[in-house]
Image: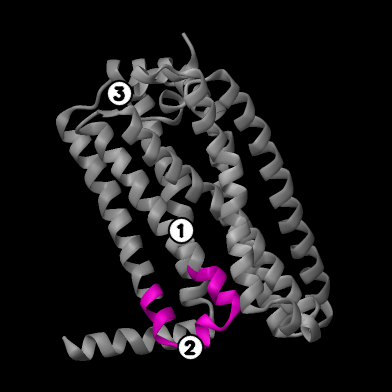
């Protein structure tokens, strides 16, 4: 029995009680609605003021927010489905999983790009305007999506090539491993995740230490940028736990089979929900410009109600 079938078997065997299942779903849905509500306010503030959508830093930030809203909505939907409908058509499951994977893999790439923008702003301030233009930022966002597609879409093509047509009309417990069951996909996933880990962490470490050395002899803005990179690093650390998720979940399954469903909830909140709550803190609260306009938006909203 492979690891994916083992996971499904354990989930079936140790199903939560009705009360526990309701509590878990309410917790996850409330957290996701709260974070998406805050992020919707950030998007509204961004769209209302030209100062933001002509600035590459805020364009990358709002792309991250939109991406995270899509990812959060999809993963919460799959979480609730796993307790209610339980099984989905493979074709529907594949669609959900593909979009969830794309948005999940976009996040660390977007964070790496934001770290580079901070580095250019602090270490190469005279060239920042020439290097970080709106056009190049939009091209970079396109490159982020293209890179994620190159990593994710082969899962679909391999499955189309190796599975019979009847497989796509069957119903499964919706996981990546059940929607894309080929062993080749697992090997490809491990290689691509390793490349992502190495590449993104090299960028984070390089930009952080360059800004760190600049901050020792430079301005308050450099020190703030250094702290921003640290927050990105923490956010990235949580996000990239996704890349070691298969091994981590197998360890949890072997060690705590009877509480495996509780481990899945803790894993989901730490890896999927918590990183998406850090973005509003970094730019919605810590950034002076965005905070000023966000306060104005909130005050106007209160005064009209």
Q: Residue at x 18, y 39 (%)?
A: 22
Q: CA distance from mark 2 to mark 3?
A: 48 Å
Circles 2 and 3: CB distance less than 8 Å? no
* Comes first in the chain, label 2 or label 3: 2
Front residue of 153/37: it is 153
Looking at the rendered structure, which numbered label has been put on residue 50? 2
Is 59 one of the magenta-colored residues? yes
Screen quadrant of the C terminus: bottom left
Q: Which span of residues is magenta-colored?
A: 43-62
Tell me where residue 138 sits by quadrant. Answer: bottom right
Q: Of helix, strand and loop, which one carries label 2?
A: helix
Front residue of 98/122: it is 98
From the top left corner, tell me how far across and down residue 52 is, in percent.
51, 83
From the top left corner, tell me how far across and down residue 186 is, in percent.
58, 25
Q: Residue at x 39, y 85 (%)?
A: 48
120 on left or right of 92: right
From the top left corner, tell me how far across and down residue 37 is, in percent.
31, 66
Looking at the rendered structure, which numbered label has been put on residue 169? 3
């Amino acid at each position: 029995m492979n690891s994916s079938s083992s996971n499904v078997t354990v989930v079936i065997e140790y199903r939560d009680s009705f009360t526990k299942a309701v509590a878990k779903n309410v917790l996850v849905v409330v957290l996701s609605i709260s974070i998406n509500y805050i992020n919707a306010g950030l998007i509204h503030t961004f769209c209302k003021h030209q100062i933001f959508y002509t600035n590459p830093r805020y364009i990358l930030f709002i792309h991250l927010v939109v991406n995270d809203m899509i990812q959060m909505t999809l993963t919460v939907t799959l979480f609730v489905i796993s307790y209610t409908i339980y099984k989905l058509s493979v074709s529907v499951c594949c669609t959900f999983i593909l979009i969830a994977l794309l948005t999940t893999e976009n996040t660390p790439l977007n964070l790496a790009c934001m770290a580079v923008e901070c580095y250019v702003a602090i270490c190469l301030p005279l060239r920042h305007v020439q290097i970080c233009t709106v056009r190049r930022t939009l091209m970079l966002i396109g490159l982020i999506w293209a890179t994620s597609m190159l990593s994710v879409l082969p899962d679909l093509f391999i499955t189309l090539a190796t599975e019979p047509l009847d497989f796509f009309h069957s119903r499964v417990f919706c996981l990546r491993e059940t929607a894309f069951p080929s062993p080749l996909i697992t090997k490809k996933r491990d290689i691509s995740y390793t490349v992502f880990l190495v590449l993104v962490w090299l960028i984070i470490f390089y930009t952080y230490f360059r800004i760190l050395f600049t901050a020792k002899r430079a301005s308050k803005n450099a020190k703030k940028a250094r702290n921003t990179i640290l927050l990105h690093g923490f956010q990235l650390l949580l996000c990239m736990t996704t890349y070691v998720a298969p091994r981590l979940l197998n360890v949890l399954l072997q060690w705590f089979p009877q509480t495996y469903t509780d481990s899945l909830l803790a894993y989901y909140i730490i890896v999927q929900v918590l990183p998406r709550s850090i973005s509003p803190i970094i730019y919605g609260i810590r950034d002076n410009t965005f905070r000023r306009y966000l306060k104005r938006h909130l005050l106007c909203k209160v005064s009209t109600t």
